[in-house]
Each structure stands twice: as C-alpha cells, then as structure tokens.
C-alpha cells in the first residue's frame, strides 16, 4: 500500500529547500549537501518531491507564488497610481534583499531556455503571471515586462542601483505616452 505524502511536512521542507536554493542557486545543486543543510535526507527529498528536477520545479513555483503574492498585496489598492505602483515594484526589485531571488530567476530562465522540459511551465508562467499583473492590455504589459526584465538583468550584472533607478524613473514617466496608434492591432 502506498503512503500518502504528509502535505504539511512537505510544505515545511519546501520552505527550507527554497531558502537554500535562493541562497546557493542551481548551478551545482546536489541532493546530499541540500538535504544536510535543510536537516533532511536525500531519500526524504525524493520521497516528497519525486526527483531533483521536480524538487527544483516546486521551488521555482513557490518562489514565484511568494513574489506574486507580495506584489499583489503591495500594489493591490485601486487608489494607487500607476506611477506609484511601478515605483513600489522597482523599489522591491532593486532592494539588495531581493537580489538572490532575481539571480535565481535569471539562472532558471537561462536553463529553461536551453531545456524547457527541465522545468515544465516555468517559461510560460514567468511571462503570463507578469503580463496579467502589469496591465490588462497585453501589448502594454509586454513593453513593461521587457523594461523590468532589462533593468533587472542590468542590475544583477552591474549592481549600479543609482544609474538604473534613474533610468527606471525616466522609463516610468515615458509609460504615460504609451497609447496605441489608431488601427494598431493589439495582441490578444
């Protein structure tokens, strides 16, 4: 008879594993050191998650869920202006405490671009979640997403928060000018 996975134990373990992966990344992730760091065993990690790839996929889903919950809570007010929302999002993304999450995101993104089957759904969700969050208009949301991703990648590469934040402020001001030309066909 097959035992059912204790969902509470799995959730607690996933939180510990997620913290470890955010801090150490994916590039040389190995089950033994991971298990030791989270007070578990490789066998228990496999019992709860099935495989190393499924464990990483669960970590990526969980960190994305946490991030989206945080941004929705932070920007959920109908009273918040769009400029204030973008300012709040960038302030969070550029905070040094957020850097490990940003680096993990770009690391996973590059791995998934090479091998999309490795993290099923990651690429699609990394785009769709943000498009939905940034604007009901997919064309405008795509422009915003491209801007944020570019600024985030630049920040991760250079650490030049002052220069990039100044550029973000100019970019946010320019977003007000984004109105489609008459007859322009929007992405659906």
Image (spheres, grey):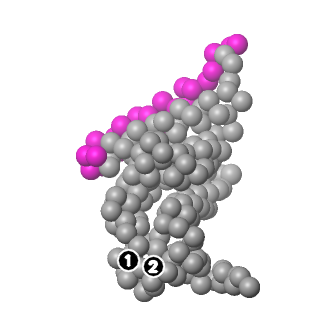
Determine whether, in the image, residue 84 is placed left or right of residue 158. Answer: right
Q: Earlier in the sequence, mark 1 or mark 2?
A: 1
Q: Provide the secondary structure element on which disc 1 rests.
A: helix
Q: Which residue is mark 1?
A: 32
Q: Which residues are magenta?
A: 157-183
Q: Which residue shows up at 41% across the image and 45% down it? A: 110
**Residue 179 picture location, percent across and down:** 61, 24
Look at the image and tell me in which quarter the N terminus lies: bottom right
Look at the image and tell me in which quarter the C terminus lies: top right
Q: Provide the secondary structure element on which disc 2 rests.
A: helix
**Residue 7 picture location, percent across and down:** 66, 80
Report the disc number at residue 42: 2
Q: Which residue shows up at 60% across the image and 32% down it? A: 140
**Residue 109 picture location, percent across and down:** 45, 47
User: Can residue 31 be seen in this snapshot?
Assistant: yes
Residue closest to the eye, 158 or 114 = 114
**Can you tell which quarter of the image residue 2 is in?**
bottom right
């Amino acid at each position: 008879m097959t035992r059912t996975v204790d969902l509470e134990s799995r959730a607690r373990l996933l939180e510990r594993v997620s913290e470890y992966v955010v801090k150490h990344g994916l590039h040389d992730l190995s089950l033994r050191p991971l298990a030791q760091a989270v007070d578990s065993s490789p066998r228990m990690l496999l019992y709860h998650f099935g495989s190393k790839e499924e464990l990483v996929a669960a970590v990526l889903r969980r960190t994305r869920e946490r991030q989206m919950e945080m941004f929705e809570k932070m920007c959920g007010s109908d009273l918040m202006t769009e400029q204030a929302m973008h300012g709040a999002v960038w302030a969070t993304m550029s905070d040094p405490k957020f850097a490990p999450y940003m680096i993990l995101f770009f690391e996973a993104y590059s791995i998934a671009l090479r091998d999309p089957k490795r993290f099923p759904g990651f690429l699609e969700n990394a785009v769709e979640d943000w498009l939905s969050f940034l604007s009901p208009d997919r064309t405008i949301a795509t422009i915003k997403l491209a801007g944020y991703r570019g600024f985030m990648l630049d920040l991760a590469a250079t650490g030049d928060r002052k220069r990039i934040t100044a550029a973000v402020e100019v970019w946010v001001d320019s977003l007000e000018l984004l109105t489609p030309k008459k007859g322009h066909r929007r992405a659906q």
